[in-house]
Image (spheres, rainbow, N blue to C red):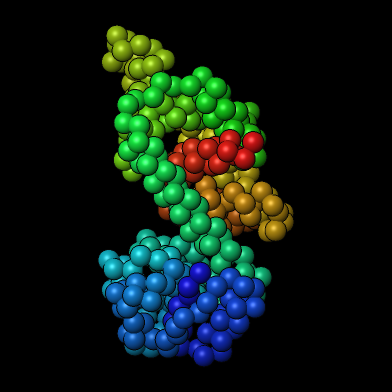
Amino acid sequence: MRFYIIDDDEAVRSMLAQIIEDEGLGEVVGEAEDGSLIDGENLNMLNIEILLIDLLMPNRDGLETIRQIKSYFEGKIIMISQVESKDLIAEAYSLGSEYYINKPVNRIEVLTILQKVIEKIQLEKSIQDIHKSLHAVLKFDPSPRKANPMNKKSIRNSGQFLLTELGIAGENGSKDLLDILEYLEQTEQTDILNNRFPTLKGIFIDLAKKRLGTAAPVVEINKEIKATEQRVRRAIYQSLNHLASLGLADFSNWKFENYASKFFDFATVRTKMAELKNGSAPSTSLTRINAKKFIQVLYFEAHRVHSEQ
């Protein structure tokens, strides 16, 4: 991985660079003491994959810098600061920051977060490779393939394994999620193959029509759509609770490390962990769940699990 560090504290830049290099995470190809010294195009020219940037700097702070580069920079952004303002942190996330590292810098926290970001980048690259492979298959065999019952069974079995790992195999929405995997398996040569993952609304509509029949009354189809969506979202939320609980008990827990940042934005996981630790009511601002991301990752992870069997 190629890193770039922006922080007005030379000691912090040195410490971060040392952690990156000592742990073999990649190469620090550039540093700057202020956000005004860089722009998105230069970062892309350097092939920067991960940008670490301080929230507060004298000339151009981290938030303003992200606003300036977000239209051009293609890599991941990690904020660094001792500021605890929820509004500032929320704004950083809304602007495109992936994660947040607290100051004073803690080696274990830095290492854990950087590994999560690297895993996310690698997962995204794997998904792109799958898309390319599917395009290659279609190029050589443009005729539609009939669904293979064994493949359907495999994607469902792989999905069941993952739902067990995620702590929701027994939830009501688990069957809906498995049905969604089979639906995506059947449609991968159209929407997914063309890098157009089906919308959640489209998935729920098609599932409802498949279950009730296309001739079913619109009212009944709408009821089924709503019920399915509610079950799925509750199951996903329970998975977030499960993973956050594992991380709260042991930050190095294998399942927490392997799944939390893949299926959820790490900001959401950290917020849920804080809620569980403090016994506070769920936040309505920072714990929003990206159901589409969860389903996308579940689908591609199920394919990966199946290929390893």
**Left or right, 289 with reference to 103:** left
Q: Is residue 52 above or below residue 294?
A: below
Q: Position of residue 202 (x, y in %)?
A: 32, 30
Q: Position of residue 252 (x, y in %)?
A: 70, 58
Q: Residue at x 51, y 24 (%)?
A: 152
Q: Position of residue 158 (x, y in %)?
A: 59, 33
Q: Residue at x 41, y 21 (%)?
A: 146
In this view, which residue lies farthest toward the front?
140
In depth, the one of 148 and 119 nearer the eye is 148
Q: Is residue 17 above or below residue 284?
A: below
- The answer to whether residue 13 is visible is yes
**Left or right, 177 with reference to 243:** left
Q: Quadrant of the C terminus?
A: top right
Q: Residue at x 37, y 29 (%)?
A: 187
Q: Residue at x 57, y 33 (%)?
A: 159
**Left or right, 76 with reference to 155:** left
In this view, which residue lies farthest toward the bottom?
10
Q: Is residue 116 above or below residue 260?
A: below
- The answer to whether residue 104 is visible is no
In depth, the one of 36 and 18 nearer the eye is 18
**Left or right, 79 with reference to 194:** right
